């Protein structure tokens, strides 16, 4: 399992617009790529967000990067050209413990 995490710091006055964009446009469009098997959107205190995209394999994550990431990032920049700080990390899952 590959965990692609995107953390975004958003100016307070943009947080509502950011949440709406993520819920109504960005995440549904990424979900439609079928590169990921699960997506989580979370908010930390203040206006810090994290989205975790789970890919079944490295190949699926790379398919996202090669076929979709540039357009998704460009669209994000059109909606939020200033003020947001974005960090990306990729984690390789080692083991998962399912709920009993």
Image (tube, rainbow, N blue to C red):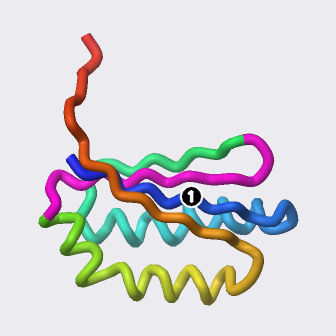
Query: How many numbered discs?
Result: 1
| Percent position of residue 71, x then y | 41, 87
Q: Is residue 51 magenta?
A: yes
Residue under the point 66% across and 70% down: 85
Q: Is residue 23 left or right of residue 38?
A: right
Residue under the point 49% across and 54% down: 51
| Percent position of residue 59, x then y | 13, 66
Q: Residues within 10 Å of mark 1 (few under 14, many from 20)?
A: some
Q: Is residue 53 left or right of residue 46?
A: left
In the rendered image, the vertical position of residue 99 relative to residue 28, given as above or below: above
In the image, which residues are magenta?
Answer: 45-58
Q: Is residue 55 magenta?
A: yes
| Percent position of residue 39, x then y | 39, 51
Q: Is residue 94 left or right of residue 69?
A: left
Residue under the point 69% across and 53% down: 48
**Nearer the observer, 26 or 97:** 97
For residue 18, which quarter of the picture?
Answer: bottom right
């Amino acid at each position: 399992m590959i965990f692609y995490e995107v953390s975004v710091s958003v100016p307070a006055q943009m947080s509502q617009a950011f949440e709406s964009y993520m819920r109504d446009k960005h995440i549904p469009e990424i979900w439609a790529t079928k590169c990921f098997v699960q997506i989580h959107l979370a908010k930390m205190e203040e206006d810090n967000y994290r989205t975790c995209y789970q890919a079944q394999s490295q190949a699926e994550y790379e398919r996202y990067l090669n076929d979709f990431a540039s357009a998704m990032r460009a669209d994000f920049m059109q909606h939020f050209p200033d003020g947001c700080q974005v960090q990306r990390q990729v984690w390789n899952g080692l083991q998962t413990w399912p709920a009993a």
